[in-house]
Amino acid sequence: MAEHNHHDHDHDHEGHEHITLVDDQGNETLYEILLTVDGQEEFGKNYVLLYPAGVPEEEDVELQAYAYIENEDGTEGELQQIETEAEWDMIEEVFNTFMTEEEE
């Protein structure tokens, strides 16, 4: 069964988008959205890559990646675990392209 994470979505004054994830124990962690990936054509859902908010750019962080299922009425929706190798491959390819463009 897929794990569902509750989240709140917010924007700060610098234009960064934030999501607060709440784990099974009720602990809240603030993340910034690094990248969104449109996977509607291939998988019927979008994806989001997150990193912990407030971490210096030069510091290595563990990225979190989730499938994002939007609610039918256009409200926030929910994050779900990524389940297939094909989804991970597509996300990794988009991320690698993003990182290459950032370095140029």
Image (cartoon, rainbow, N blue to C red):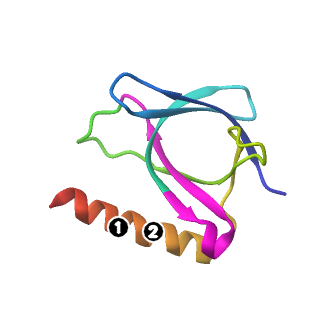
Could you tell me residue 21's position as x and y percent?
Answer: 62, 34
Which residue position is annotated with label 1? 96
Magenta stretch holds residue 94: no
Identity of the residue furthest to the left in this view: 104
The amino acid on which the numbered mark 1 sits, given as a three-letter code, is: Asn
Quadrant placement of the N terminus = bottom right
Residue 61 — which label? none
Q: Circle 2: is it few (<14), some (14-19), or many (20+) Cα within 10 Å?
A: few
Residue closest to the eye, 55 or 97: 97
Residues rendered magenta in the picture = 37-54
Task: Give the main secondary structure, helix, strand or loop, of the magenta stretch.
Answer: strand
Could you tell me residue 45's position as x and y percent?
Answer: 66, 62
Residue closest to the eye, 35 or 84: 35
39 sits to left or right of 96: right
Could you tell me residue 56's position as x and y percent?
Answer: 28, 34
Q: Circle 1: is it few (<14), some (14-19), or many (20+) Cα within 10 Å?
A: few
Mark 2 lies on a secondary structure that is helix
Could you tell me residue 81's position as x and y percent?
Answer: 68, 56
Quadrant placement of the C terminus = bottom left
Q: Are marks 2 and 1 in contact (CB under 8 Å)?
A: yes
69 sits to left or right of 61: right
Which residue position is annotated with label 2? 92
Q: Is residue 74 visible?
A: yes
Mark 1 lies on a secondary structure that is helix
Identity of the residue furthest to the top in this view: 13
The amino acid on which the numbered mark 2 sits, given as a three-letter code, is: Glu
> Which of the 4 image quadrants contains residue 92?
bottom left
